[in-house]
């Protein structure tokens, strides 16, 4: 269950970072982000990615939790990339 929480936080963090980029924001919302929104999305993305390590460490301890977190980060990044690719094709 904690791995799922880490996955959700990682996915949301990568999605926020992607939305802070002009191209992806334009693909999703039809226009580029304002500077304030870009900064807020970037900050939120990094905060969510930083927080996503906590559930993995709580579940599996420090050494295994960090390895688990890197795996979860990889899966979340691939999912965001695939969804953005799929969205831009449609």
Image (tube, rainbow, N blue to C red):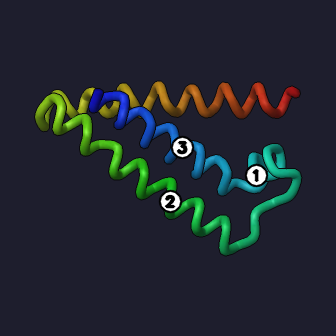
How many numbered tags mark residues here? 3
Instruction: Determine whether 17 is above or below 88 in the image.
Output: below
Classify the position of the N terminus by image quarter. top left
Q: Earlier in the sequence, mark 1 or mark 2?
A: 1
Res. 25 mark: 1
Residues at marks 1 and 3, CA–CA distance in whole angstroms: 13 Å
In primary-sequence order, the first of circles 1 and 3 is 3
Label 3 sits on residue: 14
Residue 18 rendering spot, x and y as whole percentages:
64, 47
Q: Are marks 1 and 2 in contact (CB under 8 Å)?
A: no
Residue drawn at 11 percent across, 34 percent down = 61
Q: Measuring 25% from the left and 45% from the top, which residue is drawn there?
A: 54
Q: Is residue 3 left or right of residue 58?
A: right
Per the model, the C-alpha gap separating discs 1 and 2 is 15 Å
* Category of crowding for the residue at label 3, using alpha-carbon neighbours closer than 10 angstroms: few (below 14), some (14–19), many (at least 20): many
x and y, in percent, of residue 28 in the image? 79, 45
Q: Secondary structure at mark 1?
A: helix
Of residues 22 and 57, the one drawn nearer to the viewer in this rendering: 57
Label 2 belongs to which residue? 44
Q: Residues within 10 Å of mark 1 (few under 14, many from 20)?
A: some
Secondary structure found at label 2: helix
Q: Residue at x 56, y 60 (%)?
A: 42
Task: Judge by depth and name the residue closer to the eye, 59 or 46.
Answer: 59
Instruction: Return the x and y of residue 78 as percentages of the image width and height.
Output: 56, 27
Residue 73 shows which numbered tag? none
Helix, strand or loop status at disc 3: helix
């Amino acid at each position: 269950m904690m791995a799922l929480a880490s996955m959700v936080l990682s996915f949301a963090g990568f999605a926020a970072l992607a939305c802070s980029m002009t191209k992806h924001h334009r693909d999703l919302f039809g226009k580029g982000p304002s500077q304030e929104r870009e900064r807020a999305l970037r900050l939120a993305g990094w905060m969510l990615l930083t927080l996503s390590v906590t559930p993995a460490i709580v579940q599996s301890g420090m050494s295994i939790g960090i390895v688990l977190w890197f795996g979860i980060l990889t899966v979340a990044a691939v999912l965001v990339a695939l969804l953005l690719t799929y969205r831009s094709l449609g």
